[in-house]
Amino acid sequence: MKIVVIGGTGLIGSKTVAILRQGGHEVAAASPKSGINTITGEGLNEAMAGAQVAIDLANSPSFEDKAVLEFFETSGRNLLAAETAAGVRHHVALSIVGTDRMPDNGYFRAKVAQEKLIAASGIPYTIIRSTQFLEFLGGIAASSADGNVVRLSPGLFQPIAADDVAAIVADVALAAPRNGIVEIAGPERAPFNEIVARYLKAVGDPREVVGDPEARYFGGRVEERSLVPLGEARLGRIGFDEWLRRSQARA
């Protein structure tokens, strides 16, 4: 089977490409560096020729509200048009758990716009909404830091390892389209501030983490269950301690 992975050289994309190639599939790892650009449309029609499945893992280089919305709308339209022309039979996209519950988060609003384009495209699809990645804990701490204090919501958090995300993305891509949403999350759920505090302690970062109900997450207010699945979710296998052990071994 020919599968095109948009964003195929990124964190999730590179892992997904490796899994699918190990399964014997013909996989194109598409990125601007490989001459395939979803914003300009360059190389898209050629990449999609003969593909049965397209996986969209592209991410905006800017998180500014207007820029991120323009990215996902433009990228989505160009990609879906190329897929329609090529007769792609399954569009898989990675989105975020809670994206429709935090309207004051500009990035989440942009992902909602992307999801709407997919649902209206007429291409059979599966949207995978994932919780935040464990690999982003350091960046989350940095973005929430004020000097030596990191302020984070005590709302629930259920981060997932990138290896688990990639495994599920590959699995979903090879299954029949759901024409709907699948939610995925890590195996452990705890308050947001507690998980980040645990991470900083484990890596020897002395900053203090404070639970603050008013703390914003990329501009959005976090309620108790804003960032975790509300219903049934597919859970990853790699817990926090195991992920930490693996990531430190790689480093």
Image (cartoon, grey):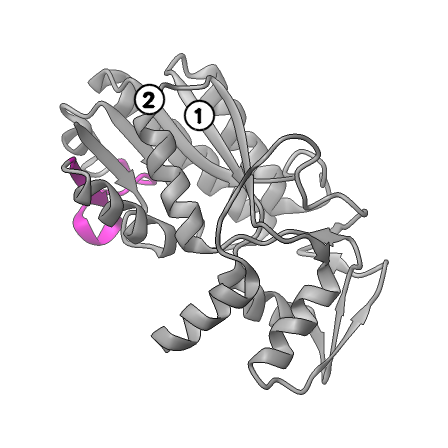
Judge left or right: residue 203 versus residue 48: right
> Which disc, if any, is residue 90?
2
The residue at which mark 1 appears reads as: 126
In the image, the segment drawn in magenta is 25-41
The residue depicted at 67 percent of the width and 44 percent of the height is 228
Q: How crowded is mark 1: few (under 14 residues within 10 Å), some or many (20 or more)?
A: many
Residue 86 visible in the displayed image: yes
Q: Which of 49 and 128 is in front in this view?
A: 128
The residue depicted at 45 percent of the width and 23 percent of the height is 118
Judge left or right: residue 44 versus residue 146: left
Q: How crowded is mark 2: few (under 14 residues within 10 Å), some or many (20 or more)?
A: many
158 w.r.t. 80: above or below: below
Give the Cα separation between the discs numbered 2 and 1: 7 Å
Residue contact at pointers 2 and 1, CB within 8 angstroms: yes
**Sequence-first tag of 2 and 1:** 2
For the residue labelled by badge 2, is the local secondary structure a helix, a strand or a loop? strand
Q: Residue type at mark 1?
A: Thr
x and y percentages locating residue 140 in the rendered image: 61, 65
Q: Nearer the viewer, residue 207 or 231?
A: 231
Q: Residue type at mark 2?
A: His
> Which disc, if any, is residue 107?
none
Is 181 part of what is drawn in magenta? no
Image quarter where the C terminus lies is bottom left
x and y percentages locating residue 12 in the rendered image: 37, 51
x and y percentages locating residue 83 in the rendered image: 28, 23
26 w.r.t. 118: above or below: below
The residue depicted at 33 percent of the width and 38 percent of the height is 170
